[in-house]
């Protein structure tokens, strides 16, 4: 009882602290319009045929945060997605894309190789803090952050536009991967998993799109790079060029058109100001995104510290940040008997509330994906089924529980530089140590 009382006290204090940080998003029932229908047709995937070279995407990194933090006293959003957004020019997607356009970003492919290859998902650790800064996240087209267990988050980084020879640290598979991989029709790279999930992965129809030391895939696709003080399980890194090359050998590296997302440089009307987003996962992990008007990107902090990429020393940033409220359920039947933690089933099918942040504004709507384990892509929609268009560029998806606890949004920028110090990136040239552990 004493431990329980202490836990409740800590939780209350933490909640009061969060409430001081901004205004919570209200994920209540829709008050205007009707829930979107679920019969929108999904076109069959097909490979693009030709390639038109274009300029590559090089974001500006200039960023000057606000010196003081003044939350708006009148900012009280309610969940009322618009049914009739003002018409804008025809978007890219969600079911068809111009030739040579990457459906993950709405931008031209930087080269023919990126157009011809299949998306590749790599599982990347985000806990304990010693694993930060990770390597390669800034090169991903999409990144999904979700709860692995107990408020600890993990990343599923989706690569296609750019290839990196050192991504990680690579970590284990989870149930959500059985949704993300088919959703992107992707290659899937991970370190290991519980045996029940391993058996599930071995039984999927896309088995030959999976790459892992757990399944006998080692150098040059995966190698360990020991670093003093870094636990063994966080020393595995992936070489994306080598994984795509092995996928070529298996005849599974096909440039599929992944449908679902829509893009337009012109934002929808009716957006509300959103210069800062704060997300807390049960006091164990938190993320802050701040909008930079100078270049139009949201920049990321993790636990109050600028979140960097160890490969280039740059702060992680995104054109779009999407927060999804998704049902979570414990699956103790899918973890080893000796484990004290149940496997977490994040039910990324059906539909739920979504908040889309772009261009310093946010929009309320729905996410929708038809069919558990299906190849249907995720859609972001208003109440009338029209797409919520993203700004062309990279997108981070933040998956939280239904009701969106711990999600706060502010019109003002907090002084993040005063809350922590920059973590020095580990910019090393290591010698790999080949091993096969998970």
Image: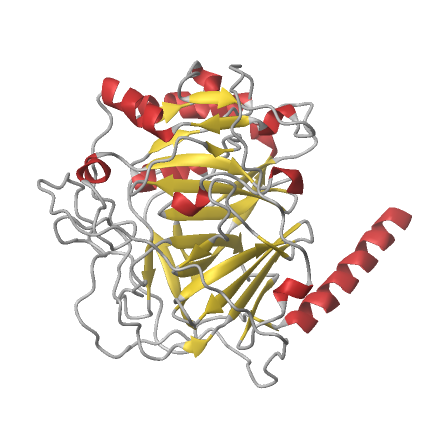
Judge from the rendering whether residue 105 lies leftward or rightward of residue 358; answer left or right: left
- Answer with the quarter of the image where residue 341 lies: top right
Q: How many marks?
A: 0
Residue, far left: 50
Judge from the rendering whether residue 1 lies leftward or rightward of residue 344; answer left or right: right
In the image, residue 224 above or below residue 254: above
In the image, residue 438 above or below residue 422: above
Question: Residue placed at 32% from the left, 41% from the top?
Answer: 162
Where is residue 259 drawn, in percent x and y?
Answer: 24, 49
Question: Residue placed at 63% from the left, 75% from the top?
Answer: 69
Question: Residue placed at 28% from the left, 64% from the top?
Answer: 387
Of residues 176 and 138, the one nearer the viewer is: 138
Question: Residue placed at 70% from the left, 31% from the top?
Answer: 340
Where is residue 128 drawn, in percent x and y?
Answer: 66, 39
Judge from the rendering whether residue 387 lies leftward or rightward of residue 356; answer left or right: left
- Answer with the quarter of the image where residue 152 lies: top right
Q: Quadrant of the C terminus?
A: top right
Residue, far bottom: 74
- Answer with the quarter of the image where residue 317 lies: bottom left
Judge from the rendering whether residue 102 lies leftward or rightward of residue 30; answer left or right: left
**Scheme by which the image is coloured:** secondary structure
> Residue 385, can we see it?
yes
Of residues 311 and 208, the one nearer the viewer is: 311
Where is residue 343 drawn, in percent x and y?
Answer: 58, 35
Where is residue 328 drawn, in percent x and y?
Answer: 54, 47
């Amino acid at each position: 009882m004493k431990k329980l009382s202490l836990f409740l006290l800590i939780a209350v204090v933490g909640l009061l602290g969060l409430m001081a940080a901004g205004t919570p998003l209200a994920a209540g029932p829709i008050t205007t319009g009707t829930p979107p229908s679920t019969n929108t047709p999904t076109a069959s995937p097909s490979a693009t045929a030709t390639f038109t070279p274009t300029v590559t995407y090089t974001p500006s990194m200039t960023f000057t945060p606000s010196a003081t933090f003044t939350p708006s006293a009148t900012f009280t959003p309610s969940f009322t997605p618009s049914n009739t957004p003002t018409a804008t020019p025809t978007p890219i997607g969600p079911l068809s894309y111009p030739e040579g356009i990457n459906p993950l970003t709405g931008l031209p492919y930087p080269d023919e190789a990126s157009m011809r290859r299949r998306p590749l998902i790599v599982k990347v650790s985000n806990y304990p803090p010693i694993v930060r800064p990770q390597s390669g996240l800034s090169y991903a087209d999409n990144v999904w952050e979700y709860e692995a267990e107990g408020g600890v988050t993990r990343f599923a980084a989706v690569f296609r536009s750019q290839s990196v020879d050192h991504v990680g640290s690579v970590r284990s598979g989870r149930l959500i991967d059985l949704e993300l991989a088919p959703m992107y029709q992707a290659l899937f790279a991970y370190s290991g998993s519980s045996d029940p999930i391993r058996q599930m992965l071995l039984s999927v129809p896309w088995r030959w799109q999976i790459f892992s030391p757990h399944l006998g895939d080692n150098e040059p696709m995966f190698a360990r790079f020991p670093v003093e003080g870094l636990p063994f399980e966080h020393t595995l890194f992936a070489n994306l060029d080598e994984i795509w090359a092995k996928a070529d050998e298996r005849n599974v590296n096909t440039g599929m058109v992944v449908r679902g997302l829509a893009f337009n440089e012109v934002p929808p009307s009716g957006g509300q100001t959103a210069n800062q987003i704060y997300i807390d996962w049960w006091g164990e992990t938190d993320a802050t995104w701040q909008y930079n008007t100078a270049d139009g990107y949201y920049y990321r902090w993790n636990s109050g510290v600028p979140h960097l990429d160890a490969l280039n020393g740059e702060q992680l940033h995104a054109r779009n940040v999407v927060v999804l409220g998704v049902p979570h359920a414990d699956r103790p039947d899918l973890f080893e008997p000796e484990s004290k933690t149940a496997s977490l089933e994040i039910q990324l099918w059906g539909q739920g509330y979504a908040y889309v942040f772009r261009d310093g504004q946010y929009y309320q709507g729905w996410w929708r994906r038809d069919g558990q384990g299906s190849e249907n892509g995720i859609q972001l929609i208003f109440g009338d089924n029209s797409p919520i268009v993203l700004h062309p560029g990279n997108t981070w998806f933040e998956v939280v529980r239904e009701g969106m606890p711990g999600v706060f949004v502010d019109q003002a920028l907090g002084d993040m530089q005063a809350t922590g110090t920059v973590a020095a990136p580990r910019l090393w040239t290591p010698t790999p140590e080949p091993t096969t552990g998970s």
